[in-house]
Amino acid sequence: MALASTADKTTLSYTDAPADLRWFVFALFFIFGGITSLNDILIPKLKHLFELSHTEAMLIQFAFFIAYLLISIPGAMLVKRLGYMRAASFGLLTMTVGCLIFIPASWSGLFVPFLLALFVLAAGITIVQVVANPLISVLGKPETAHSRLTFAQAFNSLGTTVFPFVGARLILGSLEKVDESALDAAGLAAYRAQESQVITNTYIGLAIALVIVALAVWTRRKRMPEMPQEPMRLFQSFDLLKQPRVAFGALGIFLYVGAEVAIGSLIVAYLVQPHVLALPERSAGELVAFYWGGAMVGRFIGSWLLQRFAPGLVLACAALGACALLAISGLSTGTVAGWALLAVGLMNSIMFPTIFSLACEGLGERAPDGSGLMSTAIVGGAIVPLLTGVIADGATLALALAMPAACYLGIALFARYCLRNPVLPLG
């Protein structure tokens, strides 16, 4: 894989990079993965507080993931200008600002300010992700890049497993204790203000942690040898879409993130249904950890598999497995329906890193441009969940699973393309 051959022309001198830098990158994966997965807990909370439909609740994911469309390319420009470590510090501080905006959002008692807070938080995460994906790809031997990125994504999944479980206890627990129908207008307003404060307290804690991590990264910014680069034009990355592999890969990222986020967003609402598991919201929220935990376990396993089998073959099997599980869940009831949906997380495990690295193979010195382009495609997390919510409101949650299933079929087609078309490095 050619991603690691860019030391002579791009920002980093990889052969001189400190060995412990990987652990800082792993920490970044843990942080932005965990905070992103908290949206799955926020959705039932804000849906309950503001009496939202499924479609309206999906605006939470729309506000969050639209940042990838708007910020990814500027983020890649920032990386080229500042270097990876300085850009990571900037992204972490931007995330901190987003967390702090939850304070005035809570005071306002309105839904829209929460969306603004999520957008700013996601803008910081976007910058951090533009840094982390190519950085971990090149910190090692080219032939193990697929495996290394998958291993790093396992730390992302560790965050997405831990944060929802803790978040469900902090954010959703009190929903079971109050009968809103027994409250008058003043009592209901006071209750909503109190519940919004629960959300705020959680994100204030995150803001404190982010400042500490940003300072740690900043103090180590000179440990990574960096070389100046030519400035990047705003839309420079998009000419890579002329390469069929890159274009198909960007579509794959769009479909994967959209499907993953759509399922995660609906899990609580799906599991609380009487014909599925009939759980209270807090208990259903805690089970979200199994969805993301399956991805964590699968990524450690996938890191091993990708060293022994063609990445395209592993990706195709995972995508078709996800389709099968969604069909089982949508056509059944009870425990089978609930756990089949949660098991999709295991199939998700290797998809993002494998699609990313397959799409960017052969980019050489344009690896940062490719990373920015792939991060832009993460906007699928804004579009697909919104469409899934429209189907859920117009029909049923079970039928809405057809939307992510269609996305996984598209990913299987990308895997087939990669198997039939070996990479040709750019000249």
Image: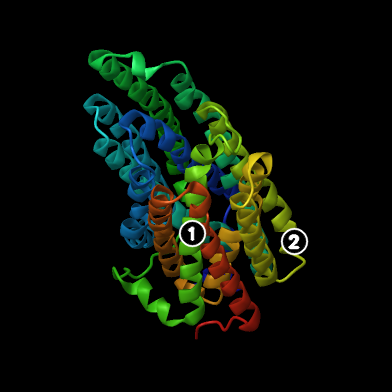
Is label 2 or label 1 in front? 1
Q: Amino acid at mark 1?
A: Met
Q: Amino acid at mark 2?
A: Leu
Q: Which residue is mark 1?
A: 403
Q: Nearer the viewer, residue 298 or 123?
A: 298
In the image, residue 21 sits, relative to residue 306, either above or below, namely above
In the image, residue 121 sits, relative to residue 102, either above or below, namely below
Q: Are marks 2 and 1 in contact (CB under 8 Å)?
A: no
Q: Nearer the viewer, residue 252 or 308?
A: 252
The location of residue 136, given as percent across then percent down, is 57, 57
Q: How many marks?
A: 2
In the image, residue 125 sits, relative to residue 139, either above or below, namely above
- Give the position of the N terminus as an image quadrant: bottom right
The location of residue 23, given as percent across then percent down, is 60, 45
> Any mark on residue 305, and which?
2
The location of residue 180, given as percent across then percent down, is 36, 19
Q: Secondary structure at mark 1?
A: helix
| x 56%, y 63%: residue | 408
| x 38%, y 68%: residue | 229
Q: Nearer the viewer, residue 111 or 323?
A: 323
Task: Report, in whole angstroms, how far the alpha carbon at label 2 lies from the one at label 1.
Answer: 28 Å
